[in-house]
Amino acid sequence: MTAEDPFAHLHDEAYADRYATPRADRRTLVGTFGRPAEPVAGPWRLTLDPFEEGLRQAWTAFDDAPPTTWTVPRDWDPEGGTPVPVPSCWNLLRPEWTHYEGAVWYETTLDWAAGADGERAFLQFGAANYLARVFLNGRLLGVHAGGSTPFSVEITGTVRPGPNRLMVMVENRGRPDRVPMHHVDWFNYGGLHRPVTLLRVPPVFVRDFGVALVPDGTFGRVRIDVILSDPVEGEARFACPDLGLDVPVPVVAGRASVTVEARPDLWSPDAPRLYDVALAFGPDLVTDRVGLREIRTRGTEIVLNGRPLHLRGVCVHEDDVATGRMTSEADVMRRFAHLKDLNGNFLRLSHYPHDEIVARLADREGVLLWAEVPVYWAIDFANPATYADAENQMLELVARDRNRASVILWGVGNENADTDARLAFMVGLAAATRAADPTRLVGAACLINREAFRIEDRLAAHLDVIGLNEYFGWYEPDFEGLRRLIANSSPDRPVIVSETGADAVVGLRGEGRTLFTEDWQAEFYRRQAEVLAGAPWIRGLAAWLLYDFRSDRRQTRLQRGFNRKGLIAEDKATRKRAFHALAAIYAAMAADPDPDPDPGRQNRGSVV
Ligand code: GCB
């Protein structure tokens, strides 16, 4: 488009090509690590832009001039936007926005006061669903894909003292090439649903800082990994006062890895011991609070700190009737309290990365976590761009949560048909995940052969833990298939039932297998538990799921836009009968957690 031809943009369908770079991805992600993060508090305004006129017409180049001074008409001005809070999901802010999927513009003024000489500054976004383009003073600073992981853009050099115009375009269309694709069983909330903050750092700074127990069975070595912003040489210093550690860390070409001897109290759900750690490089100082533990498999067992572990869990979506995907500490602590009342020790964070505070609080509270990326159902496995997106989301998640002891397993996929393209995709993703983080297990929710009734998925050979999603007794009328599946399967590695469940409407009662009744949902869990007890290689259960959640696939008079498999209704308060049934099952499991240990195991320790 030129200034001379106000109509050229109407005929330019390649308009988005001008806004494809620079990418904001895992390479540009800056860990906060205890540095003060200033909230970009707004006020923010939001404008819906279903046709992406903002890109077509370059709204980002507009100045603040009032309409009385315009020489040509405009289709956007900052005053036209609706004041909105950030973070938030736009769907819940106005009734007419509930089902809006498309582009919006967030706009605010960033007031800037320069800091120390040479200081660099970054804007950090906790998450933006799905595609975000960040413009400061009309300049595109970064494009990020993926709705649930953090990203940063550097504003040094673009930001000026005084007011700066910050515009963020967020677009959340369901598309077949995205991760997830358009067809999912949850609600596609849009927007800046996690905090936006400003981070100031020295000219050369610590981008990434990992601290983990070396998983070699000795429980006596701690590895420290550091990545700096620039390929410099020098020496960093690592300290952990409670372990008596204060050691030099030589940096070569901006990277460092050292292993030190230490005898930490190991982190576990019963004793979630955390240590304060710090790393200094020049004027930069980063800190964290980490648990040190070892998670591995041994035959068909999952082993935490050398002791077999049985996972008593429940899946949970990040969904709230009032705030959508936006979460809070109180919401997370309520989840943990419900898990405790279920006599559980494990949450599967379905089906995408949840807010960073979840794993931080789980570290503190001693909750075990399965964290995953939304490689869900029939995503475009043959598309290299889709793979790159999935891998980037996974590596951003790993970078964000690598120091969280509570995260024991990375989930690389959920219920994906076993095609060649999917196998290549998932094997690559599992390998990339392991390479980025050798201190956790890699798993996925796998498939069942529904004719031969056995666990059969070529991906299983590439995983540490096989996830099994099964709904015998709900989508299938009885449990016979599950009995056969158990009799016909002899996996050589641990299996977790990564989902099983039944819908129930609060207060609906009935005899026998009357679907959607609280009675059948409760009985379903009792029968499931009986049958699953016959499989010694099943090392955990993640019931589907803690709370009812919004899903537009669910439109019967009983569902009314909600998946009703919650043990608790969407009010996050009303417990269904199945809640108590599962609590009793888990109480019994906790009392006798490992009735049939792996026969190959030599020394049986006590069970966590
Ligand atoms: C599944 C999916 C989960 C669904 C659930 C259901 O297997 O993994 O996302 O919500 O079943 O309720 O059908």
Image (spheres, helix red, strand yellow):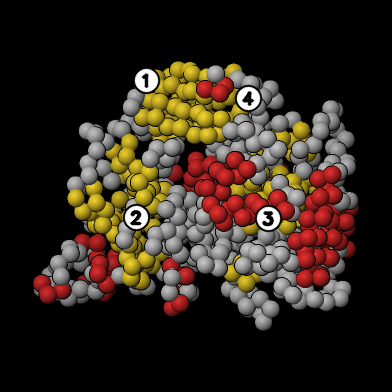
The type of residue carrying mark 4 is Pro
Front tag of 4 and 1: 4
- Tag 4 secondary structure: loop
Q: Which residue corresponds to the image point at 53% horizontal and 42% vertical from the top-left?
A: 401
Q: Give the residue pinned by disc 3.
A: 338
Of the numbered discs 2 and 3, the one sitting upstream in the chain is 2
Residue, disc 2: 41
Instruction: State the residue in front, 333 or 368.
Output: 333
Q: In the rendered structure, which disc, 4 or 1, sits on the residue that comes first in sequence? A: 1
Mark 2 surroundings: few (<14), some (14-19) or many (≥20) residues within 10 A: some
Nearer the N terminus, badge 3 or badge 4?
Answer: 4
Q: Amino acid at mark 1?
A: Gly
Q: Which quadrant is home to the N terminus?
A: bottom left
Q: Secondary structure at mark 2?
A: loop
Residue 202 quadrant: top left
Task: Look at the numbered disc 3 and say if its residue's Cβ is closer than 8 Å to ligand 1.
Answer: no
Instruction: State the quadrant of the C terminus.
Output: top right
Image location of residue 352, percent across then percent down:
56, 55
Residue 389 image point, x, y percent: 48, 52
What x and y, as percent, mark residue 532?
84, 54
Circle 3 sits in a helix, a strand or a loop, which is it? Answer: helix
Q: Which mark is residue 498?
A: none
Of 380 and 69, nearer the camera is: 69
Residue at 43% across / 70% down in the picture? 93
Q: In this picture, is 434 found above or below 93? A: above
Would residue 166 be seen by someone viewing this image from the given angle?
Answer: yes
User: What label sits on residue 234 in the rendered view?
Assistant: 1
Residue position for label 4: 264
Q: Which of disc 1 and disc 3 is earlier in sequence? A: 1
Residue situated in front as seen by the camera: 483 or 86 = 86
Marks 3 and 1: which is nearer the front?
3
* Spatial separation of the CA atoms under disc 2 and disc 4: 40 Å
